[in-house]
Amino acid sequence: MKRKVVVTGMGVISPIGNSAADFEAGIKAGKSGIGKITAFDTTGFDVTIAGEVKDFDPSQWFEKKDARKMCRFTQFAVAAASQALDQAGLLKDGRITCNPETAGVVLGNGIGGFEVVAESYRKLFNEGPRRMLPLTVPMMISNEAPGNVSIVFGLKGPAFTQITACASGTDALGQALDLIRVGRCEVAIAGGTEACVVPFAIGGFQMLKALSIKRCDTPEKASRPFDADRDGFVLGEASGVLVLESEEHAKRRDAAILAEFAGYGATADAYHITAPAPDGEGGSRAIVLALKDAGVKPEDVQYYNAHGTSTEINDPSETKMLKQAFKDHAYKLKISSTKSMTGHCIAGSGGLEAIACVLAIRGGFFPPTINLENPDPACDLDYVPNTVQYGPIETAVSGSLGFGGHNGVVVFKKYSA
């Protein structure tokens, strides 16, 4: 018997809101978080837009002196974890209140502290090695995020980083699920975080021809998954973090349970370093494995939060993937890409989109895919175009696909004791 795992807290830092409540309101309003890049001067770049986090003040969650020792992606993670732990009722005087030795953290990150890498390289080449930032190495590495979450809140269980590109946040949730199921943890803070709206990342993705360039003058229209006029994804930044607990642990402390985290599946395409398998076989298999792990049938699912990047290759491939996994039920599913509003937040996406599923289950709504004005004939499912829809949801699924052929899928259910 698998131990039941539940969600008791959620935290969000995103382009459409810096709390779970604001994120939910943004989704329901079909709000676009895409705009002109403000983080740096985009002169010389073809791409001048991104989904930036707005009005982020780290002093709301930790001291300024501590913020100076953290990269932006880590600041996002600590802030989101603080929100999630607070909602779960597990914080007192900034420290976790349960047994710290059975509380762990698993966070996905794809790129690390690019801004520190860039600044230290600049100093190295222009001023010499003695002028490099003293904390270059500990700030740039991806495990800085779970390490700092562990330190800040006093978590003494496992502290892991999951790196599977754009699937990192989803795979981190799956790893945390397994840690709780086998009894290594009673509580896990899990999700994803990313902050790579920096020249190096925009330039690199631009050279891959992966980013949208056609709508830099109307940025809110640029991310348009499943639309025939899409021309690439929009880079975003975000952190989405959930508090997961064994059901027994949550019940013992009379916690408010938000949803059941019921299943996880992961596969590899073994096909191409940047492109998903065109037939969608790998992603389809991940869905099938996740549903089996959750003990649910395809027809039990009402909502699927798609990877939905707004790229030429992904969207039709993902449509094939859904048809393979859900069979005829694919045409009855409500499917949407919240990346139409947030942009593609790389490792941050998996956590955000898992939270969107939990919010959808609790609120009985289907997030929209905004900017779906001219549907691609190859994408012929119900993508909840442009406007939120309402209806009961018992089971919601979220899928993430990463460079390297990584496929991760998670399943959430309405909680019943």
Image: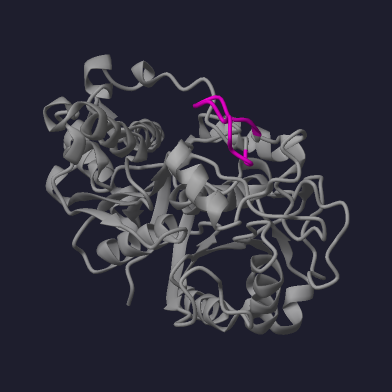
Residue 121 percent location from the top left of the image: 27, 37
Q: Position of residue 105 (x, y in %)?
A: 26, 49
Residue 396 image-quadrant placement = bottom right
Q: Position of residue 18 (x, y in %)?
A: 51, 29
Instruction: Please state if 135 lies on the left or on the right of 195 as rendered.
Output: left
Residue drawn 54% across the image and 61% down it:
413
Residue closest to the far right: 374
Q: Is residue 196 visible?
A: no
Residue 89 inside the magenta-drawn segment: no
How are the residues colored?
one colour
Q: Residue at x 30, y 31 (%)?
A: 119
For residue 335, above or below residue 91: below
Q: Which residue is located at x 27 percent, y 61 percent?
A: 180
Does 216 sit left or right of 350 as displayed? Answer: right
Q: Is residue 271 left or right of residue 330?
A: left
Q: Main secondary structure of the magenta part?
A: loop
* Residue at horizontal 43 percent and vertical 39 percent from the top: 195
- If the image is split into quadrants, where does the N terminus sit? bottom left
Compared across the picture, whether 122 is left or right of 332 comes to left
Which percent across, then down, holds residue 64? Answer: 27, 15
Looking at this view, is 257 or 132 the one in front? 132
Pick whichever, 204 or 11, lies toward us.
204
Q: Name the quadrant containing residue 84.
A: top left
Tell me if I can see residue 24 in this picture: yes
**Residue 44 on the magenta span:** yes
Q: Is residue 67 above or below residue 360?
A: above
Q: How many marks?
A: 0
Using the rendered view, name the quadrant where residue 152 is placed. top left
In the image, the segment drawn in magenta is 35-47
Between residues 380 and 175, which one lies in front from this camera angle? 380
